[in-house]
Image (tube, grey):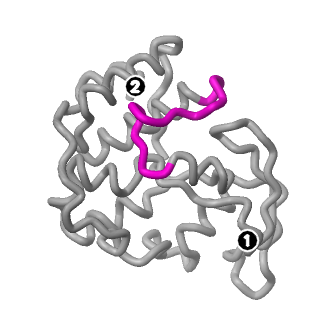
Amino acid sequence: MGSARALLDGLRVQGRGPLTGYEREAFGPAWADVDRNGCDTRNDVLRRDLGEVVLKPGTRGCVVLSGTLTDPYTGRQVVHVRGGGTVEVDHVVALADAWQKGAAGWTAQQRRSFANDPLELLAVGTQINRAKGAGDAATWVPPARSARCAFAARQVAVKARYRLGVTAAERDALARLLAPCPQQPVPTG
């Protein structure tokens, strides 16, 4: 598929659209079972991203009770216990950002698919997810320098897959993030 830097050049540069009409619910119910494996997307992502996973008995291997996470944005170890509030699933391209850069014109099904796409989702520490909020690459980058190439590549991959635009400032920020790693591969899922 090539490098993220090359893919970045193909993204449409545009202004930031309004948030008029945006609400989380426009992207469908939180954590649907879009792949029809019997498990919701949140638990699919937790099983994929956590280590030492403990599953709840009687849930067909779906419900994650606990595990450990090496936070992809900070590099810190985080212990996850269901209901403990230490790990969340981040939309790498924030839903509000997607809304402003193209998703406002999508169908409900397109928004639901986007919000539950494994490429778009990462398990991260709660505090860093809250710090990121709805920021794009022009306003927020991972504090761990070692995480920035992968973060930028994933942002570019998601924006390209869904034909979302980027602002000029965002494009420039992504180019700076990818400058030290010009051959950073594009993640696929």
Q: Position of residue 189 (x, y in %)?
A: 49, 47
Whether 99 is drawn above or below 169: the answer is below
Q: Amino acid at mark 1?
A: Val
* Residue bearing mark 1: 64
Please name whichever residue, 163 or 82, is drawn nearer the observer in this view of the structure: 82
Q: Quadrant of residue 39?
A: bottom right
* Number of other residues with Cα within 10 Å of mark 1, as a class: few under 14, some 14 to 19, many 20 or more: many
Magenta-drawn segment: 133-147
Left or right, residue 97 beside residue 163 = right
Instruction: Look at the numbered disc 1 and give the secondary structure of its residue.
Output: strand
Q: Does the segment drawn in magenta span residue 144?
A: yes
Question: Is residue 149 toward the left or the right of residue 5 in the image?
Answer: right
* Viewer-side residue, 58 vs 105: 105
> Could you say where residue 172 lies in the image, as x and y percent from the top left?
33, 21
Q: Which mark is residue 174?
A: 2
Circle 2: residue type: Leu
